[in-house]
Image (spheres, grey):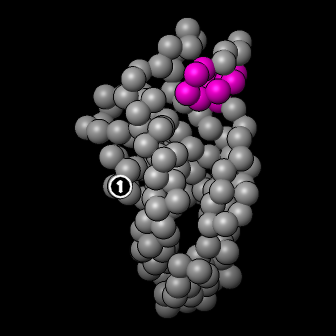
């Protein structure tokens, strides 16, 4: 089933509402999947619209806040796995967010059901070179990074 939503645009339903779209991420046009949690009837909550609109309005500034928390998460994972002591080609030493940017690819934005968390809830999904199976995800609440982990934290 397809709908043309006034805020999200043309969406297709396949257990979640979604569409492929293009967004600028650190100066590059990037193809991503936009996924909106919702029922088959295609009716979305006003808070979902607000969360998405604020994300898009503030996207240029918000994306600047993504890399340091992901880098901190990377360092934590590297430490937990012992790769701060023993070399691993998938977990090289990464000191800067510029180096990290070469290791991640933005692949999706998830507009979650309203009311699950206190505030406007958005998930951002990345593929990454160090964990091809799980990727990395961030959860934004009220346009602030609150959680970083595998992609499922953003879904």
**Image x and y of residue 35, in percent:** 59, 34
**Residue 30 sits in which quadrant?**
bottom right
Q: Is residue 130 left or right of residue 46?
A: right
The residue nearer to you, when weighing 87 against 33, is 33
Q: Residue furthest top?
A: 41
Question: Would residue 77 be seen by someone viewing this image from the given angle?
Answer: no
The residue carrying mark 1 is 144
| Dot 1: element | strand
Which residue is rendered at x = 71% and y = 41% of the image? 21
**Image x and y of residue 24, in percent:** 66, 57
Which residue is rendered at x = 33% and y = 31% of the image? 116
Question: Would residue 3 be seen by someone viewing this image from the given angle?
Answer: yes
**Residue 90 sits in which quadrant?**
bottom right
Q: Is residue 27 above or below residue 40?
A: below
Q: Is residue 130 left or right of residue 60?
A: right
Which residue is rendered at x = 43% and y = 43% of the image? 54
Q: Is residue 18 above or below residue 20?
A: above
Which residue is rendered at x = 68% and y = 82% of the image? 89
**Image x and y of residue 108, in percent:** 62, 46
Q: Is residue 117 left or right of residue 96?
A: left
**Residue 100 sits in which quadrant?**
bottom right
Q: Is residue 152 above or below residue 92?
A: above
| Residues rendered magenta in the picture | 5-18
């Amino acid at each position: 089933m397809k709908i043309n939503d006034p805020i999200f645009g043309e969406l297709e339903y396949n257990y979640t509402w979604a569409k492929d779209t293009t967004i600028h991420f650190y100066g590059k046009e990037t193809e991503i999947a936009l996924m909106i949690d919702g029922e088959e009837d295609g009716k979305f909550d006003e808070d979902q619209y607000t969360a998405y609109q604020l994300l898009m309005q503030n996207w240029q500034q918000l994306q600047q806040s993504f890399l340091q928390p992901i880098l901190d998460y990377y360092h934590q994972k590297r430490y937990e796995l012992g790769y701060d002591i023993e070399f691993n080609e998938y977990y090289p030493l990464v000191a800067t967010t510029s180096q990290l940017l070469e290791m991640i690819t933005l692949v999706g934005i998830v507009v979650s059901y309203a009311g699950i968390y206190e505030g406007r809830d958005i998930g951002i999904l990345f593929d990454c070179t160090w964990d091809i199976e799980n990727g990395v995800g961030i959860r934004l609440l009220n346009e602030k990074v609150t959680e970083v982990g595998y992609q499922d934290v953003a879904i």
